Image (spheres, rainbow, N blue to C red):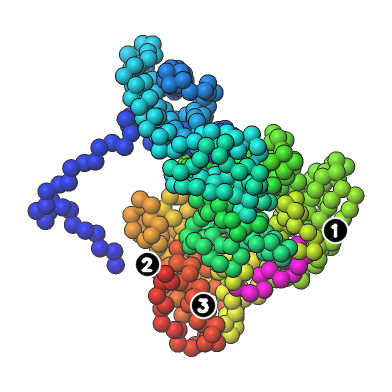
Amino acid sequence: MTVIPPDAASVGLSPQPSEPPEYPSPRIVDSRRLMGPNLHSSSEGAALEVQLADVPVSAHRRLYDAWCMAAGMQLRALEWPGAEFVVQPHASGDAAGATLFLPAPVDVLMTATELAEQAWVIAERAHQIEGHVHGDAVLSERLRVMADTERHSKPNLEAVHRVARMRHVTVTFDDERVSIGSGTGSLSWLLAELPHPSDIAWETVRDIPVTLVTGSNGKTTTTRILAAMWRAAGKVTGWCCSDGVWVDDTEVERGDYSGPAGARVVLQDDRVEAAVLETARGGMLRRGLATHRATAGIITNIAADHFGEYGVHTLHDLAWVKLIIRHALEEGGTLVLNADDETLCEVAPSVRANIAWFSTRAHFVGLEQLQQSGGLAGTVQDGRALLLTPGHSHDLGAIDDMPLALGGAAPHNVANLVGASVVAYASGVPLDAIRHTLVHFGAVPSDNPGRLQLYRFGGVTALVDYAHNPDGLAALCSTANALPAARRLLLLGQAGNRDDDQLRALVSSALSTTAFDRVLIKEMPQMLRGRAPGEIPAVFASELQRRGMPADRIQVVNEEFAAVREAFAWARDGDVLVCPVHVEKARVLAWLSRLREQAWKPGDELPDTPTQPS
């Protein structure tokens, strides 16, 4: 039962004073530093999100132009390099507004965010009185002091950054550390102790192979496959994903490290000989990429998810977010795209990059032209994975021999295996190491924990996955549909930052793929994201019943782990349990391991609930 705390006034407490506004204008909804290549530029800078729902559309352009003018005046007053401003209006009328971006030197990015915010205030003031934009000497002096203070805390950062870029080596930094080069070729310092470029032994600095992995679904699985391929090649491999950071078998950090923080941990580790970096949408939008240099990158697919954030409202918007990774590709680097993804095929002609393709179809669109141009591709033909290089077709093995493919019952994992093979080859992994990994990866649960793991307990089959959007859930349910079953159960849940239409789309994707005899709707209190308790399950239950599922086949469970346990309590021989797990994965996997150790089968008593792993 959810207990709502009483109102403060009703228990005699004095109301707390309201917090001061975060930004100087109520129309500013976000202001952030972009510390690497980003959606708007291959350079660092500051981004401002503004919403103008209360302003006539006819006035939007005047406000944007006024912001550019006010920001330009302040840049000139600070004697910063000339900048090309970016104004990206949002596509949705319900969230009318724009993202405003200005490039800035790396050592004054906090000052740049303040400059962007104050320029907006000046623009609003000019719009309000229908006057001209004027300079503000007091503001200019305040920004100059702020910039000087910020530079003092980061001595030599801009100079080292500039020289590293000129020498074509990686430079990564945050608010504490900075490094040049990567892995075994890196040098690192505390930010406050960074030496002058003339005092650095640049001849010892070099980069290791770095692969960036992004997309809507399959990122973590692809990252793990690539890390296994590099390890099979004999390299000490560092990799980060939404579960943590590893160097070979050693867990360095636990948690979601699919953003710049995870990339920095890997790239600054001087043990690492090859790096694989899961690169999620959120980190790229909030902070930009952590590195300017990568050997290769892959976009697994584009699926409807996270719409409405940072001006992303369409599949094409999302594709261009994922394509940020192209900015980091070194000269001659390869960008690997999914030829079975319609959105990627549509935007590819506008992308300036050396593109390779992968597909699960023997003769995908554009294959003939790719082969004629001497390109690189991966595909599946007659049940075998093939790598196509100029003049050669390399047999990578039978799909049925690849544990991750579940005998072909998991076509999305076939795509992950083929895509990983292409980007691995482009990154420098030998063919023997690729082949070795394909026939071994996925044979044990520790290879890919929480991603399409198949468990059998007596006559019960359970599929555990992270499926968190309609395409991912459809792929998981399709796999379940390919398995024989007396009955099928679905565990259904979602975070509160998706709107009702996106929640209903999850139901549609599941039911259009597979018939379920029971649905357990899990509440996830850790992921309400502003929603009221019970609100998300109510939307799911309503949509399930609208689509014909009887109410007595639907059950709401208040926690994720409790929902998994309830699924096993319901199960009997012949059943298939489809269990997307999001917030309590470690706890669920530990419990399933305990079931396996006890040789649990339907009808046996379920073991006690394990504590949440630390």
Residue at the image position 59 percent from the left and 56 percent from the top:
270
Picture quadrant of residue 41 = top right
Instruction: Please state which of the two labelled residues, at mark 3 or mark 2, is closer to the viewer.
Output: 3
Q: Are marks 3 and 1 in contact (CB under 8 Å)?
A: no
Q: What is the spatial separation of the Cα atoms under label 2 and label 1, in whole angstroms?
A: 51 Å
* Labelled disc at residue 394: 1
Residue at the image position 79 percent from the left and 45 percent from the top:
365
Q: Nearer the viewer, residue 326 or 188?
A: 188
Q: Which x, y percent locates residue 582?
A: 48, 62
Task: Give the residue number, with chain letter if any, for mark 2.
Answer: 558
* Labelled disc at residue 587: none
Image quarter hosting the C terminus: bottom left
Q: Amino acid at mark 2?
A: Asn
Q: Which x, y percent locates residue 213?
A: 63, 51
* Labelled disc at residue 592: 3
**Which range of residues does the magenta coloring cover?**
434-445
**Judging from the image, what secondary structure is the residue with disc 2 in?**
loop
Q: Which x, y percent locates residue 68?
A: 46, 20
Image quarter hosting the N terminus: bottom left
